[in-house]
Image: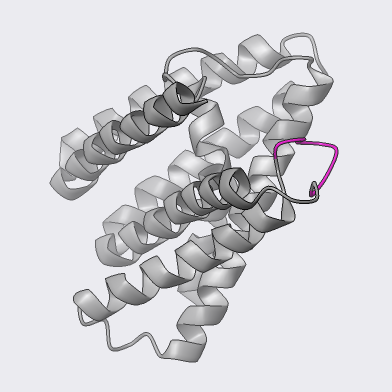
Amino acid sequence: MNQEITKRILSSIIIIAIALFFIIKGSFFYIFFLSVFFIITSFEWYKMTKNKNYFLFGLILLILSFFSAFLFRNTGQTDFLLVILICASTDIGGFLFGKIFKGPKLTKISPNKTYSGMIGSFFLSIISALYYTSYYGLIYWTDNVLLITVILISTVSQIGDLTVSYFKRISKIKNTGKIIPGHGGLLDRIDGMLFAIPFAFILFKLL
């Protein structure tokens, strides 16, 4: 178990570092980054759902998510990075709190998900977002609006995680791939973001 956690942490650090580089660089670099991620996740989804009647649903979601990520970053890099931070903190908080505190299972769809993990997801995402907005002096985020926004985005991210877990379950596979040590496939790693980024993009436009 310790080796699994170590692999997961190291993989997360490497992925986040690579993603930040391309997001901050922007331009051609970011388009290249998104294209590679889209091709890999689409291939993983195809392998998992080929000849299944829900293949088209996932493909449409992937196109919508990556297009939203492209638009979001180009219209507001700071806010886009905030959403990425919330999603990453949601995933990490859920994993750590679930492993440490364990407790009742959240749903049969994903046996590893617990109520303690759900609480950890909200807790770490809120703390991370508060620190981020304070550090960068984003005064247009009031505490109440930020708190509600983080909870909404974290909730959608968790729903996205559970949705992909559901499709993995009915496809009778554990992971979508083996490209990331400790995580499985790339789709396993960004499942929450696929739902959260389009949602956040629309939400931020309304705000």
Tell which of 168 and 206 is nearer to you: 168
Tell which of 35 and 175 is nearer to you: 175
**142 w.r.t. 170: above or below:** below
Q: Quadrant of residue 161?
A: top right
Q: Residue at x 40, y 90 (%)?
A: 142
Drawn side of residue 49 relative to residue 194, left or right: right
Span shown in magenta: 106-112
Q: Is residue 207 visible?
A: no
**44 w.r.t. 28: above or below:** above
Drawn side of residue 196 relative to residue 15, left or right: right
Drawn side of residue 25 relative to residue 157, left or right: left
From the top left corner, tell me how far across and down residue 131 is, in percent.
Answer: 30, 73
Q: Is residue 124 visible?
A: yes
Scheme of colours in the image? one colour
Secondary structure mostly taken by the magenta-highlighted segment of the chain: loop
- Determine the residue located farthest toward the left in the rendered image: 25
Q: Residue at x 70, y 37 (%)?
A: 112
**84 w.r.t. 134: above or below:** above
Q: Could you tell me how many numbered marks the image carries? A: 0
From the top left corner, tell me how far across and down residue 5 is, in percent.
Answer: 45, 31
Drawn side of residue 108 relative to residue 139, left or right: right
**126 w.r.t. 11: above or below:** below
From the top left corner, tell me how far across and down residue 24 is, in percent.
Answer: 17, 49
From the top left corner, tell me how far across and down residue 194 is, in percent.
Answer: 55, 43
Q: Residue at x 60, y 18 (%)?
A: 176
